[in-house]
């Protein structure tokens, strides 16, 4: 078809969206060229390799699709050298897209990233720096940074790379930031703690403190035991509504420390501290229901909470009105770690009194991750009983509504 003299210049003259997962060989380059038209607004390219002819077509995006608003460029690069060869083609195309507001792309190098910073319409940016070695050390130069973003997503091999990237920027102005990395390079627990502390300090220094509302930090392998002070720099962000730390560090905190931590974020809607099991006695002090009740007073807008607490300590809590007459009717998701339970009924009564709209405590995650043992099996059965009681309470509550 492509060799036919009557083949039109464009196969789809009014095409608005294209997702390309075929191949990046020279055979497909001409087909892609005919598929790229001025009417196109969304383009997603996800391929395992790219020929020079294919890259040449991509470099012409600014001419072929001048109104492009949303694009993804995911070309598998197993080595940094290959990434360096591809990035000039991608940079050339992106720098011409003045209407682009959403971009997901691999590491373009300092020059390429600086071109991205000049895109005035850009609102959402995802950068994949995992194969790059450019961030193994701090850069001597300072890049202008990002202004007026709504979303910044960063994927790196290590948190050290993320620190070096943020440190190279003059400013990061974004409402939402997500950083994911595979591991820490640190050789010892003390070194890991220092690396995390350094990351949070750099992050606080470079980010627009008043603008940031959403922060997610994800580590896929391993974690670091840490104290509450490691998060102190995050108190600089008073408008946080979402704080999610997944697999990053195991934080031990008492009721008082928990309240001290969240006091700076009265607008919190989602709080996630995941990691250790509450059955691990080596961690240190753990928050209890008393701290949880005070947390709800300090952060009344919570809709989702993932927090490890010790649920065995219920002394002094009124089972009928655990937090007085105030209740959180917004919270729909709750996980509290795998704490042992003395009385599943009392735990269910407290949770039902605090969260009248909660249907169950999420425990599936622990079922998948915790090693099989008689103690863990017994604890899981207790939490399943808690959920059974909660389900029963909800049925009674609904019947009461029907009767009224």
Image (spheres, rainbow, N blue to C red):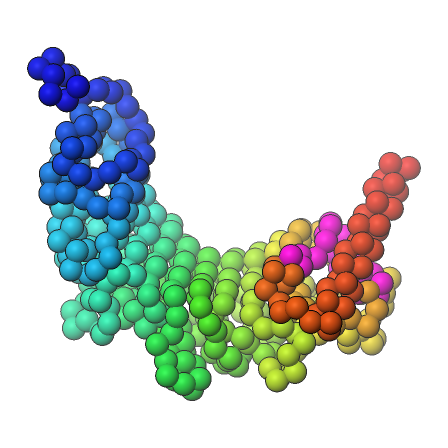
Residue 265 on the magenta segment: no
Can residue 211 be seen in the rendering of this structure? no
Give the residue at x 77% y 76%: 313
Residue 280 found in image quarter: bottom right
Which residue reaches farthest left?
5
Residue 137 on image: x %, y %: 22, 74
At horizontal 84% and vertical 45% (from top left) the residue drawn is 395
Q: Position of residue 115 (x, y in %)?
A: 17, 51
Please say if 186 is above or below 271: below
Q: What residue sits 67% from the left and 76% below the top?
A: 279
Determine the residue positioned at 78% across, 70% down: 341
**Magenta stretch encompasses residue 347:** yes
Total residue callouts: 0
Closest to the observer: 182 or 125?
Answer: 182
Q: Is residue 26 left or right of residue 257?
A: left
Instruction: Tell me which corner region of the image, top left, top right, bottom left or bottom right, holds residue 173.
Output: bottom left
Magenta-drawn segment: 345-364
The spot of residue 3 in percent (x, y) is: 11, 21
Say if residue 134 shows up in the picture. yes
Give the image quarter of residue 278: bottom right
Quadrant in which the N terminus is drawn: top left
Going by the picture, which residue comes out furthest to the right? 403
Quadrant containing the C terminus in the rendered view:
top right
Q: Is residue 291 left or right of residue 116?
A: right
Relative height, residue 67 to residue 400 (above, below)? above
Residue 222 position (above or below residue 354): below
């Amino acid at each position: 078809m492509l060799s036919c003299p009557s083949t039109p210049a464009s196969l789809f003259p009014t095409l608005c969206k294209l997702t390309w997962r075929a191949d990046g060989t020279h055979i497909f380059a001409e087909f892609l060229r005919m598929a790229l038209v001025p009417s196109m607004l969304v383009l997603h390219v996800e391929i395992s390799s790219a020929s020079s002819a294919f890259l040449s077509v991509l470099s012409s995006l600014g001419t072929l699709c001048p109104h492009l608003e949303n694009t993804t460029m995911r070309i598998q690069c197993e080595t940094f050298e290959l990434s360096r060869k591809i990035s000039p083609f991608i940079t050339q195309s992106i720098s011409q897209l003045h209407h682009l507001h959403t971009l997901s792309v691999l590491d373009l190098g300092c020059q390429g990233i600086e071109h991205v910073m000049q895109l005035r319409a850009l609102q959402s940016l995802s950068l994949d720096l995992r194969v790059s070695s450019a961030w193994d050390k701090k850069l001597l130069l300072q890049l202008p940074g990002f202004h007026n973003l709504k979303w910044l997503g960063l994927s790196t091999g290590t948190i050290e790379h993320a620190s070096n990237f943020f440190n190279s920027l003059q400013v990061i102005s974004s409402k939402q930031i997500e950083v994911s990395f595979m591991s820490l390079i640190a050789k010892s627990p003390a070194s890991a703690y220092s690396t995390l502390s350094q990351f949070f300090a750099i992050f606080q220094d470079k980010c627009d403190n008043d603008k940031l509302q959403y922060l997610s930090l994800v580590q896929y392998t391993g974690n670091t035991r840490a104290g509450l002070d490691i998060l102190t720099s995050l108190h600089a962000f008073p408008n946080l509504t979402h704080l999610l730390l997944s697999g990053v560090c195991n934080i031990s905190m008492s009721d008082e420390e928990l309240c001290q931590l969240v006091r700076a974020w009265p607008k919190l809607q989602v709080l996630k501290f995941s990691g250790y099991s509450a059955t691990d006695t080596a961690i240190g002090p753990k928050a209890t229901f008393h701290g949880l009740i005070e947390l709800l007073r300090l952060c009344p807008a919570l809709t989702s909470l993932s927090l490890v607490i010790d649920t065995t300590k219920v002394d002094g809590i009124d089972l009928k009105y655990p937090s007085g007459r105030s209740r959180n009717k917004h919270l729909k998701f709750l996980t509290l770690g795998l704490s042992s339970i003395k009385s599943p009924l009392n735990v269910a009564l407290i949770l039902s009194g605090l969260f009248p709209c909660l249907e169950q405590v999420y425990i599936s995650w622990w079922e998948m991750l915790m090693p099989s043992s008689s103690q863990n099996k017994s604890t899981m059965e207790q939490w399943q009983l808690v959920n059974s009681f909660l389900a029963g309470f909800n049925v009674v509550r609904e019947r009461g509504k029907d009767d009224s």
